[in-house]
């Protein structure tokens, strides 16, 4: 194994390191007033495998250090060894609560490098699914956030409603999560005939359920006490720490990339960017609940203008043969297409074979493509050297960046506030560790 | 993040605040319209005459020398017409010296071979700067040597606290040392990991696994692919 070797860097003396075995020496190093507490990575309220190193003075948090990397899977490195069209399958597994956003940002970046625009039907279909995904993601946030406060009813309600949205995704992509449904050049399959009816049914189902949520939470004294005036972070501190998304909007900044730098057809929709001036956890609750309404507003407009037509670009060098959807009879291939490539056209067969085995090449260049994910600015910095594989894909994950602000938000608060603050940041560890 | 305050400091009542002199206005577009690529380029070239610029697919990139990074980023953050309060992204790309070859892979029926030849190996560090108030953004690209010991850049964590995690990630993945960083430790890989995985000379695979009959699978460069296919 030709791995370059490098001696471990010496640690500064004033650093505290907790690695299980040296717990005794760490405890000895702490003076009488301060207590070092290790929280996670297997703690039910740390959103997966987030590990926090807390320094406490009694109940008061003096310092919080997020230790991450437990879920690192090397997705960016793996993608360098796979063709461009295989990328969505990897990137959809990063932020698994909002998988379509990863696919969307990657596909938009590849399309920008290729200088193509997807057909309008694919564009509108993407936006409908993305906004449903945003609702599902915010519901997960409500559900897990409620569970961490001890409100298991909120948890079951949130996950219950999300299941119906996942039913929609399953009906279109075949998978409830990690869809790999968006491909460079369009979407994998055309929408099913009952797509619009399913969306309409969901749009009718969600508002009354959201009213139930608000009835349950808005005047709940425990929920109010735990969220109000907790985790304060103002707009300037947000920007200094790179915090975007609902947290920045809860600090009064109406910054939403869908509005300020429209991409993928968002310029055609009329919606508002909800903000709050509270800049605390309650403000983030308000913003996210209001965003669910705005998402439904976008979906209604998109359903009205969903055109007929192709869902993949015409260019046969790029377009994945997406006709090969699973039919109602359970037979996997489109007989018309098979007849064409097997019986009529040798060139079509060669093209199919080369596209499926080698993929398409992308002109050299570098792009950075940011989209507004439910957690903030999700950016794909893609470098191509003109081959059929990405030379480098770097993902600017909002969860990863936002987590840095947990320290300034928690200082001076109590340990129980840390739970609420981490919940209000809504980090998804698959995105943090990649 | 917390490492910026000394350990002996008493309990901080208020969180560490950035310099209030550069506080942005809170509404997008209130300070002024976004600057065009030409205006941004002119303003930068006036102060930094040897900066190279490039526009690709509508994205503006400034190529600067390592010793200019802090000056340029300070200028972009503080100048009223730039007002880039947000460092959106910081990432690295490795371009190794010598021949970089992606070999034809038997197991996948022949992906085309790819060869690039370079004299000097570099790690390109990319800063994406964004202005919330003016709604423009651009990229600053710095090339540093990829040789261990020479791969150094000054930190920008004192300008943008958000660079903390990003610089740790670039150090972890590419081995670029950021001088002055408050806590330059590995962030995603384990603390005792050897090598920097995102460098192109670091192979994929090649890690011992303890399942599948406990068989060691060598890295792709050392694998006889025909053997595995059979």
Image (cartoon, coloured by chain):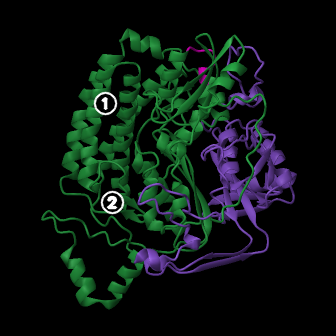
Chain colours: A green, B purple
Rendered location of residue A189, percent (x, y):
29, 63
Q: Identify the residue at horizontal 62%, vertical 67% (top origin).
A: A365
Query: Mark 2 sits on what residue?
Result: A121
Q: Is residue B147 above or below residue A44?
A: below
Question: What subunit carries mark 1?
Answer: A
Residue A268 visible to an observer of this rendering: no
x and y percentages locating residue A341 in the rendered image? 28, 84
Extent of the magenta region? A409-414
What is the crowding at mark 1: few (fewer than 14 residues within 10 Å), some, or many (at least 20)?
many
Residue at image mark 1: A158
Tell me the quarter of the picture where residue A187 sits. Answer: bottom left
Q: Earlier in the sequence, mark 2 or mark 1?
A: 2
Callout 2: SS = helix
- Comparing labels 2 and 1, the label whose residue is closer to the camera: 1
Q: Whole-percent x and y of residue A123?
A: 38, 57
As measured in the structure, the alpha-carbon distance from the residue carrying label 2 to the one carrying label 1 is 30 Å
The secondary structure making up most of the magenta span is loop
**SS type, badge 1:** helix
Q: Is residue A166 visible?
A: yes
């Amino acid at each position: 194994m030709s791995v370059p070797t490098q001696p471990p860097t010496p640690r500064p003396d004033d650093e505290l390191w907790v690695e299980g075995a040296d717990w005794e020496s760490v405890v000895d190093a702490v003076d009488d007033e301060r207590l070092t507490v290790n929280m996670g990575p297997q703690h039910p309220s740390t959103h997966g495998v987030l590990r926090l190193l807390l320094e406490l003075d009694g109940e008061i948090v003096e310092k919080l250090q997020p230790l991450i990397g437990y879920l690192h899977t090397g997705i960016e490195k793996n993608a360098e060894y796979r063709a461009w069209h295989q990328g969505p399958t990897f990137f959809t597994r990063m932020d698994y609560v909002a998988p379509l956003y990863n696919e969307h940002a990657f596909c938009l970046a590849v399309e920008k490098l290729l200088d193509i625009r997807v057909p309008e039907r694919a564009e509108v279909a993407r936006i409908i699914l993305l906004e449903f995904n945003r609702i599902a993601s915010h519901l997960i946030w409500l559900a897990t956030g409620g569970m961490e406060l001890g409100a298991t009813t909120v948890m079951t309600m949130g996950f219950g409603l999300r299941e119906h949205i996942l039913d929609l995704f399953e009906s279109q992509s075949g998978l409830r999560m990690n869809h790999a449904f968006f491909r460079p050049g369009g979407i994998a399959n055309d929408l099913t005939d009952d797509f619009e009816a399913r969306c309409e049914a969901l749009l009718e189902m969600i508002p009354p359920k959201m009213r139930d949520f608000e009835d349950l939470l808005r005047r709940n004294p425990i929920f109010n006490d735990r969220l109000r005036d907790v985790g304060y972070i103002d707009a300037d501190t947000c920007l200094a720490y790179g915090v975007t998304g609902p947290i920045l909007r809860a600090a009064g900044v109406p910054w939403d990339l869908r509005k300020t730098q429209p991409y993928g057809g968002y310029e055609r929709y009329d919606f508002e960017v909800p903000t709050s001036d509270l800049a605390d956890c309650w403000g983030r609750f308000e913003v996210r609940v209001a965003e669910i309404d705005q998402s439904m507003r976008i979906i209604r407009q998109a359903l009205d203008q969903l055109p007929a037509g192709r869902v993949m670009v015409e260019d046969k060098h790029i377009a994945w043969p997406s006709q090969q959807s699973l039919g109602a009879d359970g037979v996997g291939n489109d007989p018309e297409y098979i007849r064409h490539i097997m019986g009529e056209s040798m060139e079509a067969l060669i093209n199919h074979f080369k596209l499926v085995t080698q993929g398409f090449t992308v002109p050299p260049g570098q792009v950075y493509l940011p989209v507004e994910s439910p957690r903030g600015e999700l950016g794909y910095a893609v470098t191509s050297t003109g081959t059929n594989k990405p030379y480098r894909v770097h993902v600017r994950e909002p969860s990863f960046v936002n987590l840095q602000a947990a320290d300034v938000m928690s200082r001076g608060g109590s340990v129980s506030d840390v739970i609420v603050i981490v919940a209000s940041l809504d980090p998804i560890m698959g995105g943090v560790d990649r | 993040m917390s490492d910026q305050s000394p350990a002996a400091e008493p309990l901080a009542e208020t969180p560490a605040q950035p310099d209030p002199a550069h506080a942005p206005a809170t509404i997008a577009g209130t300070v002024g319209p976004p600057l065009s690529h030409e205006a941004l380029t002119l303003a930068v070239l006036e102060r930094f005459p040897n900066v190279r610029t490039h526009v690709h697919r509508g994205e503006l990139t400034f190529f600067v020398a390592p010793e200019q990074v802090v000056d340029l980023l300070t200028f972009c953050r503080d100048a009223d017409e730039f007002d880039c309060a947000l460092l959106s992204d910081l990432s690295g790309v490795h371009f190794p010296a010598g021949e970089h070859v992606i070999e034809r892979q038997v197991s996948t029926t022949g992906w085309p071979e790819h060869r690039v030849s370079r004299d000097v190996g570099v790690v390109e560090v990319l800063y994406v700067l964004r202005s919330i108030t003016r709604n423009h953004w651009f990229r600053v690209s710095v090339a540093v040597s990829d040789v261990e010991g020479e791969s150094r850049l000054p930190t920008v964590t004192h300008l943008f606290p958000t660079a903390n995690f990003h610089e740790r990630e670039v150090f972890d993945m590419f081995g670029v040392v950021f001088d002055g960083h408050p806590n330059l430790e590995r962030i995603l890989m384990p603390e005792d990991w050897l090598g920097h995985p995102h460098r192109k000379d670091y192979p994929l695979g090649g890690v011992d696994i303890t399942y599948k009959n406990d068989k060691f699978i060598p890295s792709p460069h050392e694998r006889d692919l025909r053997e595995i296919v059979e």
